Amino acid sequence: MSILVNKETRVVVQGITGSAGSFHAQQCLEYGTQVVAGVTPGKGGTSWKPGSGQGSQELPIFNTVSEAVRQTGADASLIFVPPPFAADAILEAADANLRIIVCITEGIPVLDRARVRQKLGVRGQGSGVRKEELSPRPSPLNPVLIGPNCPGIITPGQCKMGIMPGYIHKPGPVGVISRSGTLTYEAVWQLTQKGLGQSTVVGIGGDPIVGSSFVDLLELFEKDSVTQAVLMIGEIGGSSEEAAAEFFKKHMSKPLFSFIAGKTAPPGRRMGHAGAIVEGGAGTHEGKIKALKQNGVRVIENLSDIGATISSQLSHFHPTVTVN
Amino acid sequence: MKLLEYESKALLELYHIPLSKSGGVISSAGQLNSALKRAGCGPWVIKAQVLAGGRGKAGGVKIAKTMVEAKQVVKAMLGMELKTHQTGGRTLVVREVLVEHAAPIDREIYLAVTMDRGKGLPVLVGCGEGGVEIEELARTKPEKILREEVDPSEGLNPFQARRLCFSMGIPADQLSIFVRTAQSLARLFLEKDASVVEINPLVLSRGKLLALDAKIVLDDNALFRHPDFAKRSDHESSPLEREAKRVGISYIGLEGNIGCLVNGAGLAMGTMDSIKLAGGDPANFLDVGGGASAAQVESAFNILLRDKKVKAVLVNIFGGIMKCDTIAEGIIKAISSLKSETQKAKRKAGFSPIVVRLEGTHVQEGRDLLTRSGLPIIQAHSLSEAAEKAVQAAKQEG
């Protein structure tokens, strides 16, 4: 088991002919992900070949996502479309009834995201637009959008749907969720070096508005039979860590570890009062650490200690976990 | 992108939001007389055009009753240095002032539209008691802060504006103008891709609503839809920060002496935290971004090494989108060209020690390139090792 993606997941790559899309489609294929098609409007009917001659797999390119889904049975999309067109690409993937949508694109206007969120929300509430029978969807997300501005999802050894370096991961009991990209790789690498593998690693993205929140994913990890502990990597700003801390206390039995980046970050040069008024006291490093500790989350203060802390505490609380 | 008050007000005017009579913005005392004429009869208010709240308390807003007084105020204000609680410790020089008729104030109201991250929607925020103490009020009496969600496609409904108007106790004869103002503010927010549009205060002046001060911040990611603003120069940044922005790098100068070059904002913050824990102080925040090229790494290096405070550089790259060999090439190119520059200038052996920690895609190729380059690069395998080596190197240099 794992959450969101596994070896059955069939991935279509939107924006496969761009340089990032092409490079990472190849990397995902090499990892063993079932990448089944590419979409680039205007290049339908042609085919995509991996760049440097490694592997001989060619993929069909389609003009639209719905056509790609019809022809290949894809159930997930990985989006590399440039920022001005990325919101539309997400909506196209949702319209094609894809179960999982991962948007890597960085720099999407925040209002585009607000509009996407609003539309996906409306579609998700049983409006009858969706054909639920096509594929069962993990509740309560419908569809599950990860990102944007994120590294994607990986279930080690099964499916890499994103831009993370595959080799740093290994299968195992720790679920990882993070708002950051490269910081996640750092943490995962430390876990792997301590012999602790990961069930699924999800980068939820660093934008002010993201598709899936920490809480959404904690809920999935709590239900997942492989996951025995969760690591949450947060950062200053917003209030998603505070919400996660409350969720943990009320609904979780598995241990939750957390590192929050930005302890030494300088206060932003802000202007006006609106942000401070809307966010209240949330968002500071201090406030987040306090909320986490109050709710029983195990806080890791030093980035370099993530692997060591989890491996020592996990072997203590869960003697069944093998730690090398 | 943050707009100055007069730029913000030009947008409000475009959306027919009522403003007090303006004489425009001036940059020399010689332009004052015609500005006063345009603003009509006195008293006038002279306002420093800088990107910081708390301006009034710092002496950047003055009332002048006579033309002589106005001249004195303008002469004192132009060239003045301002530091407020919102400038992040930096000093801003006043280069332009705005001249307006000083409208009498019966009552101050707060009105703004901003993005509510939790809801993922824009929200109109109102408070019947506006003015400079609004944040304090939000902390002590949060129930006084009223909110209405703004539909990101449709805007604000009139009934929402009416609800806010009555809750804030605005007189009924101003209802229609308030509704129009609130709806326009929401429309401006949506059409211009703003992240904050704030009127503080919105006042009742002789019974009529007027926007006395305005702050607008635009979403940098949406500037491709607003070419007029994209062309506008950035008032806020230091020269190094502007140079960084031009090449697509996030850079914020800080007080310490260890230059950081990191990919990803989260890892950059984590690296700064690690430097601090190892007993050092970061000289900057620098995120080369996910998809940066070798050329970008090179420019990042040039920015770092031009910062005179920097005694050691810590490069921490975990390669995902950005491959480690790409990074290594950029580092080698930057150091080599810097080396030849210093040799040409016949300066003494020239630059700060550089600690590099690479991990991720093509890591072995990257490390090999660095080793083979023969350049004086200190390699580290873990972040804590890298932070310790950088702190040590900075101490030896310092």
Image (cartoon, coloured by chain):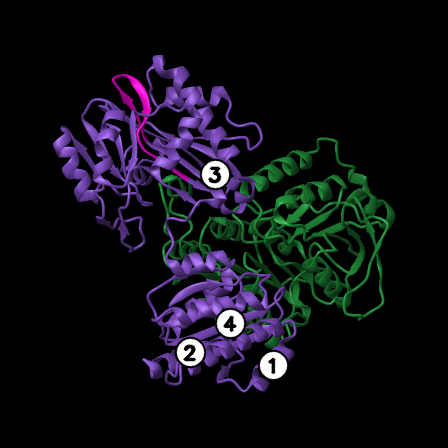
Chain colours: A green, B purple
In the rendered structure, the residue with mark 4 lies on which chain?
B
Choose the circle earlier in sequence order: 4 or 2.
Answer: 4
Give the residue pinned by disc 3: B194
Q: Residues within 10 Å of mark 2 (few under 14, many from 20)?
A: many
Of pointers 3 and 2, the one earlier in the residue sequence:
3
User: Which residue is painted at 80% across and 71% down in the image?
Assistant: A54
- The residue tagged 2 is B390
A168 and B311: which is toward the camera: B311
Q: Which residue is mark 4?
A: B316
Q: CA distance from mark 1 to mark 2?
A: 21 Å
Tag 3 and tag 2 share a subunit: yes
Q: Secondary structure at mark 1?
A: helix
Position above or below: A108 against B245: above
Check if mark 1 and mark 3 are on a common chain.
yes
Q: Residue at x 45, y 37 (%)?
A: B114
Residue at disc 3, secondary structure: strand
Residue A302 visible within the image: no
Q: Earlier in the sequence, mark 4 or mark 1?
A: 4
The residue labelled by disc 1 is B369
